[in-house]
Amino acid sequence: MNPSLIPADRDAATDALFKALSDGTRRALLEALVRDGEQNVQALTEGAGVSQPMVSRHMAKLKRAGLVTARRSGRETWYAARVKGLGPVIQWMAVHGALWSQRFTALEGLEG
């Protein structure tokens, strides 16, 4: 890859965030936490349609990406959404949304 094409603001944490969100099961787990609040692995597994070990792996990736927090209570792990973790995605979308909006406006000007 041409190094000049890699944005200066790209970092490993942002890459991990986008990778975590690239999986539909992880997005569904995160949505469940946002919608229903803190849940343990058992509750998340019941609604996920995948095994408990797979839910645990997905939650570990979401945690590493900064999208969820985890706390232990006895033998259970409870997860909660960390909405601030979406900050880099929201920022990226704002910058690139504005860029695309400008491009579409320029294209509309060419049609007239």
Image (cartoon, rainbow, N blue to C red):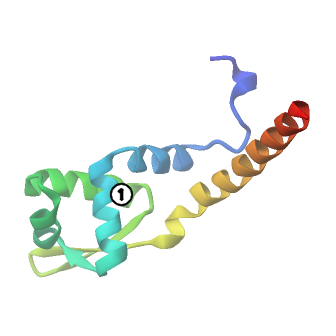
Looking at the rendering, which quadrant does residue 6 occupy? top right
Relative image position of residue 23 (x, y in whole percent): 33, 45
Q: Which residue is drawn at 43% across and 43% down?
A: 19
Badge count: 1
Q: Which residue is drawn at 28% across and 56% down?
A: 60
- Badge 1 marks a residue whose secondary structure is helix
In this view, the residue farthest toward the top is 1
- Amino acid type of the residue tagged 1 in the rendering: Leu
Quarter of the image where the N terminus is located = top right
- The residue singled out by tag 1 in the image is 62
From the viewer's perspective, is residue 35 above or below residue 60? Answer: below
Relative image position of residue 104 (x, y in whole percent): 78, 40
Quarter of the image where the C terminus is located = top right
Relative image position of residue 4 (x, y in whole percent): 76, 24
Q: Residue at x 37, y 74 (%)?
A: 34
From the viewer's perspective, is residue 66 above or below residue 96? Answer: below
Report the front residue among 99 and 105: 105
From the viewer's perspective, is residue 67 above or below residue 8? Answer: below
Looking at the rendering, which quadrant does residue 45 occupy? bottom left
Relative image position of residue 102 (x, y in whole percent): 83, 44
Taking the image as shown, residue 103 lies to the left or right of residue 74, namely right
Looking at the rendering, which quadrant does residue 10 occupy? top right
From the viewer's perspective, is residue 92 above or below residue 43? Answer: above
